[in-house]
Amino acid sequence: MKFQSSLAAMALAGWLVVGLAAAGRPSNPFFALSNGAKDPAHATPESQVAMLKELGYQGISCSGAETTPEMFAALDRHGLKMFTVYLGLSLDPDKPAIDPALAQVLPWLKGRDTILWLYIRSTKLKPSDPAGDARAVELIGQVADQAAAQDLRVALYPHVWFWLERVEDAVRLAKKADRKNVGVTFNLCHWLIKDGPEGAPQRLQLARPHLMVVTINGTNRDVTQKNREGWIQTLDRGTFDVAGFLRTLREVGFTGPVGLQCWSIKGDAHENLRHSMAAWQKMHN
């Protein structure tokens, strides 16, 4: 009798899991960018990773310079993941074309399913100028080849004011690069300040065939490049409907990782991350 009851309970649990999936509940891994995990009390990789683990984050994103053996050791101790590493390309002939940190971090990343986040800058070309496409595709291909040798993927990172500024630029370049391990990132804060609050479903549909990573944060609906008040906040603050954005993300079928952008947020890192985690969980209930 107890065995039958256990079977019934297991069956019910299975149906609940299926039902939640059918209802569109998220399965996206949630990680924090390193710019939100640092303050005087969390100055070391160990303290940062331990805090993320305590609060329920599944990992971190770091810049190339922050991607150190100490960080990997802390992640391994706490069972967390290095989701992305932030690296740059330059289209200017008088600057290093590929971030020198790439050669250093690649051997450490093998087998970790980490994504290389590539931003692209130029002081010679205006943002989104297709005159830079040929050189950009050449450099992306070089990085993609090195990444493929370590079983890694590359996601182009649109950043307002950079040459690679809009998600449309990232999609255009990903198509031209035509590499299996090259895709794009959708950054909520950079899209919003560049293009305004309308049109997220269309942009996400455009990006979806190539979409590898998404970043979110609390923000105000009316931010512009001239008025950046409230541009990046903890996830529980701001007038922009982030929960609605996440619903749209689920509707387009994206189940990949979502990162928490924290650039320029002041105050206690633990409290900020705790508030953002609470908001993330609430958005999915």
Image (cartoon, rainbow, N blue to C red):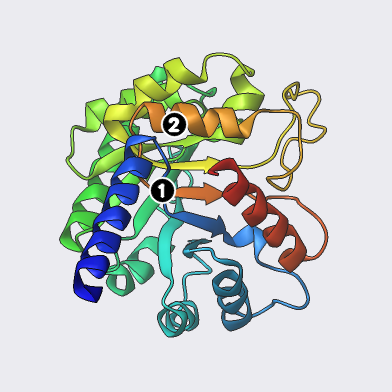
Q: Residue flagged by tag 2: what amino acid is it?
A: Leu
Q: Nearer the viewer, residue 82 or 50?
A: 50
Dot 1 corresponds to which residue? 28
Q: Do labels 1 and 2 touch, CB within 8 Å?
A: yes
Quarter of the figure with the C terminus: top right
The image quadrant of residue 181 is top left
Q: Position of residue 105 (x, y in %)?
A: 37, 69
Residue 202's place in the image compared with 144, above or below, is above
Q: Earlier in the sequence, mark 1 or mark 2?
A: 1
Q: Give the distance between the C-alpha atoms of the residues marked 1 and 2, in whole angstroms.
A: 10 Å
In the image, farthest residue toward the front: 1
Q: Is residue 209 left or right of residue 206?
A: left
Mark number, residue 249:
2
Q: Position of residue 64 (x, y in %)?
A: 47, 63
Q: Residue flagged by tag 1: what amino acid is it?
A: Asn
Mark 2: few, some, or many residues within 10 Å (few <14, many ≥20)? some
